[in-house]
Image (tube, helix red, strand yellow):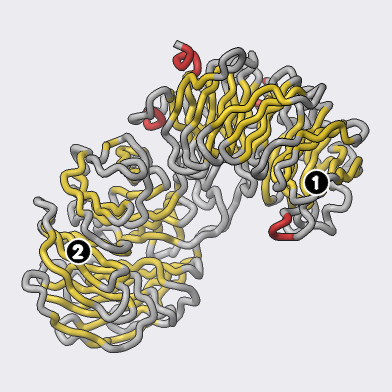
């Protein structure tokens, strides 16, 4: 459910939010933008992370591409982005779209290889150019490894093969067979041996392709292989038994096993002197081992969430005090030893970075890649169009962005962790579910709880929450029919007292969309059966039914004067007269309309789709497409005009917000 509001931020509230100094221009927000956009807020949904061998850089694969961060300055230094769906042209540096799930650095970090839709792109990290594209893999690629001299690339595939490639030419060299899917590959430090593993482990001569050793032990599903710096030991992890095995490379036999983790192994790293090993796991711990004896030396839990209610002083990758990290305790994606072996560098699933002292087992430095979000389906502008608030229906915090500097200025949260934080249009009230307890409403200025919505402690499936524009009421649907079987009701409450006002019943199937009119007088709800019902918010009376859609209602939007309602279903958009219920006009859009928004002057309608394009419609008298805006990777979930009409904000499945220059579209 998309929720768009007009957000009135007063000076006093801004001071309470402690909007920190992100007033410097964030140039990363403008790296190779799509045509018509003036900024990109957020850096996409975090998928995977990989530290460079020397720990000076971290690569973060996201839903829009791969970001490279400097671990000393904590700044983004590069962005590698793939072609849009269906394109096979050369990738662009700081441009285009796409996601990468698997990535690897060369030993000197001068090259990075990334996977995008069964193709491998090899990038020069200094020039930012992709100089090779390897696209002969018939199935998904699950692992990558670059030889120490950068001349060969090995890929692990679901097609039961390991494939070797010439990095300079991009030519395919040979294929090495496995008895099952291959998850991971690794070259020895001298580049002479290639290790590969999935359910079993094999060692190969990297030059000739001759099999050196083939172990028949069922390892489950190994996803990590790491050679020791001296090349004598190979560590494997990720199998069903949560055990890390240390192999003698010369004999191909297991020398020792490391038991203790209770979750799948995520990453492994040897100390520079070969004596110690660090392992990370889905059990949210890191463990330090003695390589010779196999004994555990230290147990390092990842940091707890120590978030400050309402305000988090962790913005734009700035360093923060040790122990103060955004996000819950999370598993570590990637880990490395420092060059002198006295410190550990780790990056967690939530994007938090830590520098650990091995002797004390405590982390000394922390910062967060705080602009990576799962998706965006809630947007709100301030009345002066200078700030934008974003969120999604399941997140427990909201982000405040400067539209002028394109920086993240603050994070809003509640005194306790909640699910699906939402906010009133004037930002004076916050609401969310204290899962699995009731839905609660707080005063944002005093941090006091105003109310508990009546009946929600007995029904955990009221979702999502939407404030009325005047902030006096809040509504939610009673579940989703496909999940709960009774999603055809809408509940309406008073925010100050939590009293339930009405239960609105009328849809024969589940309610898929609902929204308030800007004047807070009318509520529109759309159903899976294609029916739209208009309700009187003050009386709960059913005003009219709008019939005509043949697909389920996927988007609803009122004009600023509350006189016109736009509805989307399938590839059809309908415009209705709110007072009479009559159909005004019908237009055909890109299939699967997913979001709608009117401009403040009512002359323009924008529509987003599940395929990504945004269409800009000029309304009466011609209803013609004025522009088509492309730039998101995946579905558009929410569209919203700034009050001054100069900017259109779009959010979607890729976890980013694009700010579009609407004055430019009119030219």
Judging from the image, what secondary structure is the residue with disc 1 in?
Answer: loop
Q: Name the residue under label 2.
A: 154
Q: Residue 382, located in which quarter of the rendered image?
A: top right
- Name the one closer to the observer, 594 or 98: 594
Depicted 325 relative to depicted 494: above or below: below
Is residue 300 shown left or right of residue 554?
A: left
Residue at the far left in the pictured view: 208
Using the image as rendered, state which of residue 506 and residue 598 is in the foreground.
Answer: 506
Front position in the image: 155 or 384: 155
Residue 209: percent from left, percent from top: 11, 74
As drawn, is 361 to the left or to the right of 597? left
Residue under label 1, please give it: 507
Task: Calculate the distance from the C-alpha at mark 2 to the C-alpha at mark 1.
Answer: 56 Å
Q: Nearer the viewer, mark 2 or mark 1?
A: 1
Going 18% across and 59% down the picture, which residue do you hit? 146
Kindly indicate whether the residue at mark 1 contacts the one at mark 2 (C-beta within 8 angstroms).
Answer: no
Q: Which residue is drawn at 52% across and 39% down?
A: 591
- Residue 412 in the image: state x and y as whole percent: 64, 38
Residue at image location 35% in from the left, 82% down from the top: 219
> In x, y percent, where is residue 613?
46, 34
Mark 1 surroundings: few (<14), some (14-19) or many (≥20) residues within 10 A: many
Please tell me how crowded label 2 is: few (under 14), some (14-19), or many (20+) other residues with Cα within 10 Å.
Answer: many
Sequence-wise first label, 2 or 1: 2
């Amino acid at each position: 459910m998309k929720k768009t509001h007009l957000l009135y931020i007063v000076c006093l509230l801004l001071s309470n939010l402690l909007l920190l100094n992100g007033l410097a221009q964030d140039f990363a927000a403008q790296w190779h933008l799509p045509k018509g956009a003036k900024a990109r807020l957020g850096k996409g949904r975090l998928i995977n992370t990989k530290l460079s061998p020397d720990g000076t850089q971290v690569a973060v694969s996201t839903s829009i591409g791969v970001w490279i961060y400097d671990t000393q300055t904590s700044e983004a230094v590069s962005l590698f982005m793939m072609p849009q769906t269906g394109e096979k042209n050369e990738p662009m540096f700081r441009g285009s779209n796409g996601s990468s799930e698997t990535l690897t650095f060369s030993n000197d970090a001068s090259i990075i290889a990334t996977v995008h839709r069964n193709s491998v792109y090899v990038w020069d990290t200094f020039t930012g150019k992709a100089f090779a594209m390897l696209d002969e893999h018939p199935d998904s690629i699950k692992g990558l490894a670059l030889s120490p001299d950068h001349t060969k690339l090995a890929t692990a595939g679901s097609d039961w093969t390991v494939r070797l490639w010439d990095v300079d030419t991009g030519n395919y060299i040979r294929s090495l067979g496995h008895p099952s899917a291959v998850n991971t590959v690794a070259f020895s430090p001298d580049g002479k041996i290639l290790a590969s593993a999935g359910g079993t482990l094999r060692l190969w001569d990297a030059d000739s392709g001759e099999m050196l050793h083939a172990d028949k032990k069922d390892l489950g599903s190994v996803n990590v292989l790491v050679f020791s710096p001296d090349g004598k030991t190979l560590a494997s992890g990720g199998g069903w038994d949560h055990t890390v095995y240390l192999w003698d490379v010369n004999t191909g036999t297991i020398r020792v096993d490391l038991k203790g983790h209770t979750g799948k192994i995520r990453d492994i790293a040897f100390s520079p002197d070969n004596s110690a090993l660090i392992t990370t796991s889905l059990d949210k711990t890191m463990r330090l081992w003695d390589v010779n004896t196999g004994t555990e030396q230290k147990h390092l839990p990842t940091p707890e969430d120590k978030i400050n209610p309402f305000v988090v002083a962790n913005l734009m990758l700035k360093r923060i005090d040790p122990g103060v990290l955004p996000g819950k305790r999370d598993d570590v994606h990637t880990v490395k030893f420092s060059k002198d072996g006295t410190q550990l560098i780790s990056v967690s699933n939530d994007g938090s970075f830590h520098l650990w002292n091995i002797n004390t087992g405590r982390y000394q430095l922390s910062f967060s890649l705080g602009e990576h979000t799962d998706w965006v389906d809630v947007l709100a502008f301030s009345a002066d169009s200078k700030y934008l608030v974003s969120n999604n229906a399941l997140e427990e915090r909201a982000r405040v962005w400067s539209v002028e500097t394109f920086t993240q200025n603050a994070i809003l949260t509640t005194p306790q962790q909640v699910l699906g934080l939402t906010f009133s249009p004037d930002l004076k009230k916050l609401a969310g579910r204290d899962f699995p307890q009731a839905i609660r409403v707080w005063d944002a200025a005093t941090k006091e709880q105003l109310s508990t919505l009546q009946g929600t402690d007995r029904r955990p499936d009221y979702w999502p929450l939407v404030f009325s524009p005047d902030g006096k009421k809040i509504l939610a649907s009673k579940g989703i029919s496909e999940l709960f079987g009774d999603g055809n009701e809408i509940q309406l409450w008073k925010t100050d007292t939590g009293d339930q006002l009405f239960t609105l019943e009328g849809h024969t199937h589940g309610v898929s969309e609902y929204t308030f009119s800007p004047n807070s007088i009318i509520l529109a709800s759309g159903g899976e059966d294609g029916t739209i019902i208009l309700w009187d918010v003050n009386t709960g009376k059913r005003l009219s039914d709008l019939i005509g859609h043949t697909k389920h209602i996927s988007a609803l939007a009122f004009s600023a004067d509350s006189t016109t309602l736009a509805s989307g279903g399938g590839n059809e958009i309908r415009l209705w007269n709110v007072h009479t219920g009559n159909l005004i006009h019908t237009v055909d859009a890109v299939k699967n309309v997913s979001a709608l928004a009117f401009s403040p002057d009512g002359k323009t309608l924008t529509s987003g789709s599940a395929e990504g394009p945004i269409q800009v419609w000029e309304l009466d008298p011609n209803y013609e497409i004025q522009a088509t805006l492309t730039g998101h990777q995946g579905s558009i979930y929410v569209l919203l005009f700034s009050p001054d009409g100069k900017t259109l904000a779009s959010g979607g499945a890729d976890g980013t917000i694009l700010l579009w220059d609407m004055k430019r579209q009119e030219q």
